[in-house]
């Protein structure tokens, strides 16, 4: 069975071959990321050359910063295997397995104005080993459904982040997460609510923290919702949390994430901040 990334890329290639067919924003992002593999220069034109706000703190601002990154690529270049891609109005968000100075799990968000990319956020983490349930950071469901429930599903995720993770109302977990089916792709956490509880207990016993302090963004399409949050992790390091949720019947049933430290300001290559 063909995966969603391949379907999206075939769609882009088919549309590109036709005249007078307008590409969607998602088509453009898929093409841009896939250009890491093909070397195709056309997708660069989907970035506004006069306005490209960069939130990857290791890359300089603007299109010039993007170009410098590509010029400094290792031998063989970067590779991008897009696992999931979604569009929410003027935003496109993707989950990708990168070869980017080593294997990385990543989420990217692109904002468009007038059909050109003008802003980019991301979160990257080295690929981890299988989690206690034998799952990777990438496998699981990809089918996009319930397009009429996008806003309702975003509200569920927003409520979960706010009430459970920010306000610590742990008795409300089952209000948002299906207690009978919760598939977990976090590298350190097993499936189910029991797996979630065991991970929190282990953190507490080892003096580690997993704190969500601020919810910055919630994006969604159908049954998939991405949240972007800020907090502390491990020994208290400033951290960016990107959480992707799949929902069924108003409850969260599957979860992927990338939890990555925010570098100190002295190391930033742009002044736009992580969020």
Image (cartoon, grey):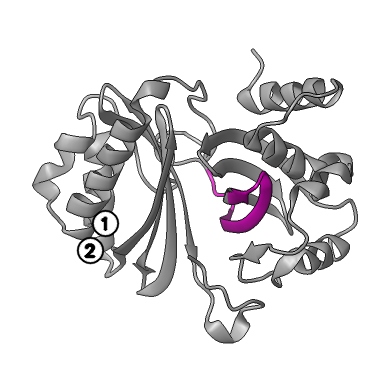
| Residue 43 shown left or right of residue 243 in the figure | right
Does 178 appear above or below 268? above
**Disc 1 versus disc 2: distance between alpha carbons?**
5 Å
Q: Which mark is residue 214?
A: none
Q: Position of residue 108 (x, y in %)?
A: 58, 50
- The residue that disc 1 covers is 202
In the image, residue 199 lies at what x, y percent? 28, 50
For the question of whether residue 183 can be seen, the reply is no
Q: Residue 19 location, x and y as percent? A: 85, 22
Look at the numbered disc 2 and give the secondary structure of its residue.
Answer: helix
Q: Name the residue under label 2.
A: 205
Q: Main secondary structure of the magenta part?
A: strand
Q: Which residue is drawn at 67% across and 43% down?
A: 115
Q: What stretch is highlighted in magenta?
A: 110-129
Mark 2 closeness class: few <14, some 14–19, many ≥20 residues within 10 Å: few
Q: Is residue 228 left or right of 213 when viewed as pictured?
A: right
Extreme residue in the bottom direction: 266
* Residues at circles 1 and 2 in contact by the CB criterion of under 8 Å: yes
Tell me the quadrant of the picture where the N terminus can be found.
top right
Instruction: Classify residue 85 by image quadrant.
Output: top right
Along the viewing direction, whichever of 198 and 110 lies nearer the viewer: 110
* Element assignment for label 1: helix
Image location of residue 12, percent across then percent down: 75, 27
- Residue at the image position 22 percent from the left and 38 percent from the top: 194
Q: Is residue 208 visible?
A: yes
How many labels were placed on the picture? 2
Residue 85 vs residue 197, the one in the foreground: 85
Question: What residue is at 65 percent from the left and 57 percent from the top?
Answer: 118
Dot 1 crowding, Cα within 10 Å, few <14, some 14–19, many 20+: few
């Amino acid at each position: 069975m063909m995966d969603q990334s391949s379907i999206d890329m075939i769609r882009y290639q088919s549309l590109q071959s036709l005249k007078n067919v307008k590409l969607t924003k998602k088509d453009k992002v898929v093409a841009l990321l896939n250009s890491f593999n093909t070397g195709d220069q056309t997708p660069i034109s989907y970035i506004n050359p006069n306005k490209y706000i960069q939130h990857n703190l290791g890359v300089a601002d603007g299109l010039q910063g993007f170009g410098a990154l590509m010029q400094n690529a290792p031998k063989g270049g970067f590779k991008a295997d897009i696992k999931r891609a979604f569009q929410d109005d003027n935003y496109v968000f993707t989950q990708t397995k990168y070869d980017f100075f080593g294997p990385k799990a990543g989420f990217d968000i692109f904002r468009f104005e007038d059909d050109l990319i003008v802003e980019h956020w991301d979160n990257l983490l080295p690929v981890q080993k299988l989690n206690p349930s034998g799952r990777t950071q990438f496998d699981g469901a990809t089918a996009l459904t319930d397009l009429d429930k996008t806003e309702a599903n975003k509200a569920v995720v927003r409520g979960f982040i706010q009430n459970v993770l920010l306000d610590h109302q742990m008795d409300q977990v089952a209000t948002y997460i299906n207690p009978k089916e919760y598939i977990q792709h976090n590298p350190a956490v097993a499936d189910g609510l029991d797996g979630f509880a065991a991970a929190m207990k282990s953190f507490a016993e080892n003096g580690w923290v997993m704190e969500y302090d601020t919810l910055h963004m919630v994006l969604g399409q159908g049954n998939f919702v991405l949240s972007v949050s800020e907090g502390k992790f491990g020994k208290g390091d400033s951290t960016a949390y990107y959480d992707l949720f799949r929902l069924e019947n108003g409850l969260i049933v599957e979860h992927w994430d990338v939890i990555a430290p925010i570098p100190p300001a002295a190391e930033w290559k742009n002044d736009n901040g992580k969020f």
